[in-house]
Each structure stands twice: as structure tokens, then as C-alpha cells.
Amino acid sequence: MSKINWARAKRFWTPWLFLVPTLIVILVLDLYPFFTIWDFSLRSWSFGHPESMGEPVGLLNYFRMMHDMTFWDSIKVTLTIFGIALPVEFFLGFFVALVLYHKVSDRIRKILIIPLLIPLTTAPVVVGLVFKYIFQGDFGVFTYYANLLGFFREGSVLGSPNTVLPAVTIVEVWHWTFFIGLILLAGLLALPREPYEAAAMDGATSWMKFKYITFPFLKPLMGIVVILRAMDLMRLFDELYILTGGGPGTSSESLMMYTYRTNFVWWDFGFGGAVSLFFFTIILLMSLVFFDATSRKD
Amino acid sequence: MTTERRSVKKRKIDLVGIAAYVFLAAFTFLSVFPWFWNLLSSFKTTTDIWARPPLFIFDPTLNNYYSAFVTRNFALFLKNTIVVGLAATALCLVIGVPAAYAFSRFKTFIGNNQLFFFILTTRMAPGFVEIIPLYLIFKNIGLLGSPIALVFAHVYVNLAFVIWLMKGFFDEITVDLDERAMIDGASRIRAFFQLILPLTLPGLVTTAIFVLIFSWNEFLFALILTGGLSRTLPVAIPGLVTPAGTYWGEVMAVATVITVPILIFATAVRKYLVRGLTFGAVK
Amino acid sequence: MKDTANLKIENVTRKFGKTTALNNVTLNVEDKDFVALLGPSGCGKTTLMRCIAGLDKPDTGSIYMDGQKINDLPPQDRDIALVFQFYAVYPGTNVFGNIAFPLWARKVPKDEVKRRVTETSERLGIGHLLEQKMSKLNVGEKQRVGLARALVRQPKMFLLDEPLTNMDARLRLIVRGELKRIVKDTGLTAIVVSHDQLEAMTMADKIAVMNAGRILQYDTVDNVYHDPNCLFVADFLGSPGMNLIPATLTQKNEMLCLDTGAFTLDVSQHRELIREKTTNSELVLGIRPERIRISDEKDKDAIVGKIDRAELMGDKQNFITQIANVRINVLSPTVLDYEDGDNIHLRLPMEYIHIFDKTSEMAIL
Amino acid sequence: MARVRIEGITKTFGSKRALNGMSFDAKDGELVALLGPSGAGKTTTFRIIAGVETSDSGNIYMDDVPINDVSPKERDVAMVFQSYALFPNMNVYRNLAFPLRMRGFKKDKIDERVKETAKMLRIDHLLEREVTFLSGGERQRVALGGGMVRKAKLLLLDEPLTNLDAKLRLHMRLELRKIQKEIGQTTIFNTPDQLEALTMADRIAVVKDGKVQQYDTSINIYNNPKTTFVADFTGSPGMNLVDCLYKEKDGSAILVNDGLAFDITQNRELVKQKASGDELVVGIRPADLNIAKERRAENDIPGEVYVVEPTGFTQIIDFKVGSQIIKIETLAALKCDLGDKVFVAPNMSKLHVFDKKTGEIIY
């Protein structure tokens, strides 16, 4: 009798045995911090009010966040970069994928991919520094040639609130366009041959092939790429930190930069905690979409 | 008549073809140029860097590398980066690979899907939620500013990635093999270690390289959790941008040292690159 | 309906790198023929079909349709429809769109598209599915959509690539008959590609048996089955295939005999033919399992064998019989009262005997 | 070697019921077939017998000892997977030795057994080869070897012939049975192919929707199918099944359907007693119908030839009467063409009647 129970129990516990280390990590490094932050966000931690340090303040931090203009500005900055960079990256990336797929031989494609990988494998910090160097006001190679053509005579494009966001967006587009290109190219290369042959026999035009075969086949993949990039753009930090530090002023401060500043410049973990959790929630929702897209693809 | 029509068509194709090649050439040039400029500048003297118009031909020098890695502390920072990367990678695999196996094989245990999704969010989340308490914990136990804190943080961020990617590799090995091994008399643990794990070796290597790359490039956690001599390269280079001026030559030298190994690694795993970049969602 | 459709393939060769997929193939398909290209995987049958469809091009040789050379004609201008093995679904549209696709491509007016699609789908019994998504259909239905797409164009000729391969045994049996009837009803020239001899025999009127890039025999179903021209064809058709027993030609007194080691067979009556066709004395004796007659103990001239295994095949029975070192299949159309290990008395009727040359593998008789 | 008994096994995956009271048994040294379409629950049954899957209820007995809760490694059941499940990182020898190593056999004993098994399966010349470089037939033999080498009490073969080409399948079905009888190991195999089951097995369990419909010898399964499912699933083509209505006319009992009428006066009492209603199904095997170009008896059914399918020395004629298509198997010597008017006479002694509602046989 006891032997039977033992066998059943073993069957039940085996999966968890493999999961124990992961569960510990999750518990210690995920759940515990999460609840800590939740607790922080409901208390006052501002150095501006040392007398009430650690006092519960209800949802005050959240109200403060809602009324902070720089918070809304940071969202605006994030959405501006997001709104321009994502479509540009997507269409440019898709176009590159299509050109590489249709117009180039297998061998050339394989060789060409290696230099094209350079941007997306470069560390964001390095990307930031290199572009800061290129955009440098006195001797930056971009500035020099732009000046020759009569643009940006007043110095670095990063120095002016009018040009800083377009410049940052260009860096993002440079960094990640081929990410989309590469993945969609993989999708194109994996397309089944039969429908295209059927379409050839049926006398379909290129547009019909695209509309009825290529696009529907790639749609799930496009969804995955877009949501991955969208999450990345929402979390944009490293390049910005190096390139502009959020400046000039707060004209290029993204939501991620803002969260950083509230926590590690103002050292207000109550207010910062509230901002962090707000941000976390947005990403959580986006992850849900990603999870849904990937599981539907299977 | 057919031949005539074909020749006309052929000329038209050539035009589109040329346009395509021009576009690709421009796209490739723009992709490579900043990196190329970085590499070039790392061999320039300060005077050459400041030159207007920008110099493409000059006398190359290794001074920047020498002063960064010998005179300054960058050799130490490089060591930190390598140590953190290797430690985080090893730990991450040890913890994550069994979990990936569990998600691949035990499809029906309670909470499977929820847990799997939950783990994903740890990777996707903006990080601050975890980073602040971690910062406080490590500060309290006096580990702040030691690479150990960063190793933990990197394990935490990359765990989801390891699990997602490795699950894909395990899924490719038929469950029949595990079951045959167990029917033939192996225990589940033995089947996993002795039979299935060796079969995922390419997957393990790929995953390890990806984790190494992520850890190597990672900035935010490193920025907050390390300081002084415990910094990694990404956090250390901005230190060359000082109020008194920027040591551009050295910045470019260090940037090159950060970039080149990653490029080599990425080329090595390019067969699985798409898979890694999409968390295994695209095979 | 369209006029005639005569397809003529002349000395077609197609190589892929070092492998020769088609080796100097010549084939003549007459109007309204239903031809099967039959052979094991890698025999070149698919390449041949793709060359006919225009999806592939011969390296040398010509393909003529009604006397006109079509080597360089793109597929859509050939007036040939192809039903794909994996149904080639267009994911961006529903069943209606999948059938209407070739008409859309040809800019046929809307109401005519609707009329023709409805008509064709009704005829194939999928009229009620037109608004469905393709992914909701089962294999049988998908196949019919593929067929409808081919028929709706009213082509001169159509090609079926392994039409039954993805179905389970039961469905295959049903679809096989239906498909044949549909093809017959359209009155079109059709070519079916198959690796399954039963599929080829049941569906087509003529079979081209292929191996290693060559057509070995091209003839009516009856002739290919009953008069194979070489060892490969004899073995490939039938399940079980023809019994092929190595034998030596020997002269015994006045008789010319085939000595198999287990028994000898007097082939004096074919002396002239054998002498004429071969100088080799190493031959192969062939007889179809169902042509062997089962007699009884009273028959003194019968060959006695021991039943190694009596396999029950429904109404039929297959006796795997050992005669000394020779092993043969004996197929009885009824179930008999024999068990494993029993002796069985057999006769090989002379009219059903085949003789092959062992070296050239070609049929002598 | 052992007796095995499976009793009332059920298994549900999510909302899908895979097994629904699966029961059958195998005698010592018997070769049993589980025959059924894909999705019938055959593989699930195997996995439960092998112990890599648990059942929701029901029992498995090995020599009358329940083994439900014994772990797979202690069950002494060997299984050969449809995918062959060969370890790709081991050569043939090590693949064969694996089950023995796991059970702690001594090195020389392992060597002896591996060589003996390899010789029996005629793969002794392949022992040093890597399994990834073997042909389909060779891989199948190695997989069989892996199952047999241990001499387990029970051997399970999951669709052993499915992945082989037609000619090889023909050869292996004979060979497999021969080897099984030679070593006398109790063996259960499953297959979706009725011919494999009929030709190889001592007894066949016909499975549908996770339940055994009929468990009997080949000859009985074929000649006396218990349900319409078994009737249809065995034979190629399967039994013709015609939905009919029971009617009485002029003192005789007939089953009618649109141009078809079968006089069953002889069995009237039996039918009345067993049938649940007027709706019945007439079943007759394709070979039990006689076809001719002229009418020979008054009861002959007139109709037309819909399709002719030659299969070598026989042919299958699809005979159309009303909206019904009936398949008839006859010698190829009879020449017919599409649309020919023909007459068909069923062999009434081979006629079966089933209850439409339950699908079960009446006689």
C-alpha cells in the first residue's frame, strides 16, 4: 500500500523537482522584490520630507505621478520615438528582407548577412557612444558633412531640443531595422513552395501572390516581431542615457529615463516605486500579447 | 516573337535588379559605416580625431588601446565583464535548463502555462521593480559594488530567455527517447542527464553564447549594482566622458574591444540567431 | 470543352547536379488518356510531371502539346492544371477564393466566377463549404478543393501529384473510385503520379513504370500487370509481386528445362524463343502468386512444398511456401484448410510462366 | 514470458476521452494486434501498459499481479516506438546494449545477448555503425533488437511496419511473426492497417474511440464482425453497409432501400427479437456479390457500373443502384465499362444484418 502511494507521489513531484531552482530564483528575485516595491509605493520615502520617512501615504505617490508634467512629457517622448521608429523600422526591415529574398542569390545573401548583423549585435552603450562621436558638434563626421551641405550649423544635433528626438530615432532605426529584416527574411525563406507553384500554374500576378500567400503566411511572424520591438522601444534607456542623458533639459527623457531619475537621482523609492509599477503593468500587458501571439503560432 | 518579348522583359528585370543592388549597397554601407568609423578612430591620435575634414587616411597608432587597458583600469573592467558573463551564464544554465526540460516534457502539470508566462515577464519587465529591492538587499549585506550582485541580477534577467530557448530545443527531441529510456530502466533524472542533455549540446552552446552576449552588453543593472573597480566595460566607458573632455580615442578603443568578440560569437551562432532574437518563437 | 490534348515527350533529360532525374525519357499521351507515372521515390516521376506542368525545364529534349513545342512556355500559358500533393492552400482566402483563384488571375467577370465556382463545387460535393476557412477542412475536403481549382479553369489536361498519399487507408479507398469517376466524367486527358502500384492500377488506363530516371514499360494496366517486360516491373506490380525464381537452363535428353534447384520445368515449347532472345543460361522464372494452381496429393506431377506461413488476407489466403531452397508466394482466391507447416501440392501452369534474362533483366517470355 | 490482462482502462486528456474502458488480454507467447484508426487510443494504451502514462481507472495485470503503480523500469515491459526512438548519439551496439546496461547486466552477458539478438535480426554486421546512417529497414531492426534484447515479459510494438515501404512491409510482416514465434515472447502490436493485423496476429482487438469493439481471431473478425465498425474497417474495401428499412410484404420479410431489396424471411424471428427498430443495416463483403451482364434470377439487383478499378487478377467494381454505391470484387476476366447495365446477386448465406441504432450485429 505504501509502495503504491510512493509511486504516485513520485510521478506528481518529478516536474517540480526540475523546477525547484527556477522557482527559488523567481521567489527571491521576482516575487519578493515585487511586493517590496508595492509596499514602497504606498509609503513616503522622499528625502524632501525626512520627518515622514516610511509613513504609509496610501495612493499619494500615484496621484503625484499623475500630476507630474515631466512624467507626461516622458510618456510623450517615448511615444514619439516609438511612433516614428517602429513603422520606419518595420517597413524598411521588411523591404530589405524582400529584396534579399527575391533579388539576391543564396550565396550573396549568406555573405551579406554578416555585415548587416553588425548594428544589432553592437552593445547599446557602444551604439550610443559611437553616434555621440559621429554627431559630435566640433569634429563629428556627420556634423562635418551636414555642415558642408548647409545643415545644423549651430553644433551637434543632440544639443538642440528640435533635433534631438529625430537624431535619437535615427540611431534606433540604425540599430534595429535589420532585426526585423533578419527575422522576416527567415520567415520568407521558410515559406512553403507549393502554394507559389500552384499560383504560377493558375497565372497569378505578383500582387495576388503577396496578398493571398506571402502576407497571410507572414502575419503571425510580423506580429511577434512588432511586439518584441515595441517592448524594446518602450524600455529604451541605454542609448539615450549615453547620447543625451535625457537632455537638453528633459526634452529627450523617455519613460525609462524618468523612472531611473525618480529612483536613482532623487532617491525617492516611494514615488519611483509607483512609477516602476505603472511601467511594469504596461509591459506586462504587452508580454501577454506576445505570449498569445507565440502560442497561437504553434 | 517569343524571343523578342523575352528580351524586352529581361532588360526590365535588369533595371529592377540594379536598383535592388544599389539599395542593398547603400543599406549595407550605412549599417557598417558607424562601426567602421569606430574601428578607424580607435587607431587615431587625438589630433587626428579632431581633424576637420575627418581623416580616412592617417598614421595608425595603438596608443589608445595601451592607455585604456594598461594605464587606466580597463583591463580590470574587461576581467570583471568576463567573470560576470561566465558566472551568470553557467548559473543560468544550471538553473534554467532543468526547468526548460520540465516545461517541454511535463505538459500537464498544474499551472504549467501560467508559470511559463510568468517567467517570461521577468525578462520583459523594465527591471526597476526588481532592481530597487535588490539594490537595497545588496547594500544591506554589503555586496553592493561587488560583481556577485550583478551575477545574480544577470541570472535573473536571462533565466526566462534560457527557459524559453531551451524548451524549443528540448521540444525538437522526440519524447519517445525519454520514454524508451525509462521503459528500458533509466530513471527520469538519468534519462535527462545521460541521454537527452547530450543531444541538446548545440542548443546548450547556442543558449550559452546568447546569455554571454546579453550579459556582456548589459548596462542598466551594471550601472546601478556596480561601481568603482567592480564596474563592467559598458558601465566603465562612459567614465571616459568627463566634464573636462572626452578621451575619444580611448572610448573608441574600448568600444572596439566590446564589439568585436560579440560579432564573432554572433556569426558563430547565426544559424540560431533568429531563434535567439525571438525567444525561440521563430525556428 | 477544349479541343484535343495530345502530349508528346521526346528524349527529355533533366539533371540536378550529379544526379540524373530524367534520362532520355520519351512518352506519348493521347487525347483522353488517363496515364499513371508509377515508380519508387526518386525514380523521376515527379520531375517528369513538373516538366509537363512547366514548373521545371528539361535540359535537353522536347515537350509537345498538340504538336506545338511548349518547353519554354510559362506554366500559366500551358492550359494544364495540377492538383498538388499537399493541396497547396492559399491561406489568405476561404474555400471560395481558393477555387476561384485561377479565374481571378484570368480576370473572369465576377458573376461568371461565381457561377463556375458554384457549379464545380456542387459537382464535387463541397458546395456547402464555400464560406469555410481552408484550415477547417479535413484532408478529403482539401483535396476536393484542389481538384475543384483544377477543374474550374476548364483546362485541356490535368495532373494529379500523389493524390491519395496523405489520406488514411479507408478514405483512400473511397476517394480513389470517386476521383477516377470524376476524371472520366470530365473527359479530359489526365496524368496521375504515384508510388503505389495499387493506386496506379485502379485509377489509370495506362501505366508508365519508371525507375532511375527511365520509363521501363508504358502500356495498358492489363499488359503491364500480365506481361511485364522486365524484372523490375514484374516485382513492382502486385502485392505480393511476381514470384521470381533464379533458374538455370539445362538440356535433359531431348527436353529443354529450367532448373531452379528445387524443381525443374520443361520449357521445350519455348525453345526457339529462348534461343533467339538470349545466349545466357542463367535465367529467372516468373509466375504471379495467384496463377499457381493448388492441386492435391493425388496429383503425382505436382511440386510439393511446405507451407511456412498461411496468411489470412480476408477472403483470400497467401501461402508462403518453401520448396527446398526456393520460397514462393501462392495466393488462393478463397480461404483453404491449410495450416502452417502443412504440405501443399502445386502446379505452375505453362500459360502463365514468364522467363527473364538474369543479366539483362529483360523479359524473354 | 507472461500473461497480460488489461481491464477497463480509462484515460481523459483535458476534455478529450482517449480511453473508454479498454479491456483485452494476451496469453503466454501470444501475438496480439490492436487494430484501429489513428486517434482510437492504441498508442495511449501502450504508453499506459509500459507505465510512462497513468490511467484514470482500470487495472493492468501481469501474470495476475496488478502493475498499475509499478514504475516503468520495474515493469519488465519493453516497447518499440513507431519513431524507433534510437539514441542518435550511440552506435548500433550501444543502442542494443542500453536496456541491459540500465538493468546492471555484466559486461560479458551484455555482449553475449547483444550479439545473439543482432544475429537473429540479421544486423550483426551493423553493430559498429552509427544509427543515423542506417536505412529505414535497418533502423527498424535495430529498434526491434532494442525491444527484444532484454527478453522482457511483454513486448509492445507501436505501428512496427508503418514507416517501411510497401515491399519491405510485406517481407517484415512475415519475418516479425516468425521471430516472435521463435522466441515465444508475449507481444502486442498496434496498427491502422487491417491487412497487417489479419496476416500477423493470433488474435485481433479492433479498437474504436478508446474501446475494444471485438476481440477475436482473424478469421472470426473477418467473417463474423460484431459491429458495423469492425465490418467496415476490415477488408479492402471493407464490407458494404446499406441502410435499410424492415418491411413485411406478402408474408415475407424484406429489407429495402431505394432499388435494393433483401429477402430475409428465413431470419425473420431472429431479427424481430433482436432489432431495436425498423432501421437495419445490411452488410455484405465485396467478394460475396456476384455480378453478371444478364439477369440470372428474379431477385438479381439491376444497376450500372459506376467505376471499374483493376487490382491485378481481380477488380473492384463500384456498382450503382439508386443513390447507393456498392463495391464488388470480382475476377478481372469480366470486362465491364462505365455505365454498363449489370445485375448483381448477393450470396445470401454471407449476408449480415446489423441494428442501425446500436451498430451491433443481429446475424
Image (cartoon, helix red, strand yellow):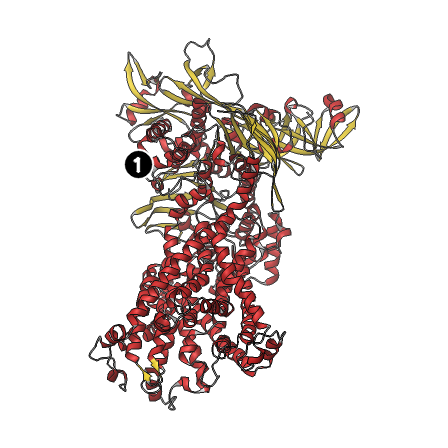
Q: Which chain letter matches label 1?
A: D
Q: Where B135 falls versus C201 (above or below)?
A: below
Is residue B210 in view from this perspective? no
- Determine the residue located farthest toward the front in the rendered image: A51
- Residue D131 as seen in the image, left or right of residue B44: right
Q: Which residue is mark 1?
A: D128
Count of marks overlaid on the render: 1
Name the residue furthest right: D250
* Quarter location, residue D84: top left
The x, y position of residue B141, in whole percent, is: 45, 66
Q: Quadrant of the C terminus of chain C?
A: top left
Disc 1: CA contacts within 10 A as few (<14), some (14-19) or many (>=20): few
Q: Is residue C17 above or below residue B277?
A: above
Q: Nearer the viewer, residue D81 or C328?
A: D81
* Depth check, front residue: B60 or A227: B60
Amino acid at the residue labelled 1: Glu
The x, y position of residue C89, in whole percent, is 52, 54
Q: Is residue C353 above or below residue B97?
A: above
Q: Could you say whether the residue bearing mark 1 is in a helix, strand or loop?
A: loop
Q: Position of residue D347 (x, y in %)?
A: 63, 23
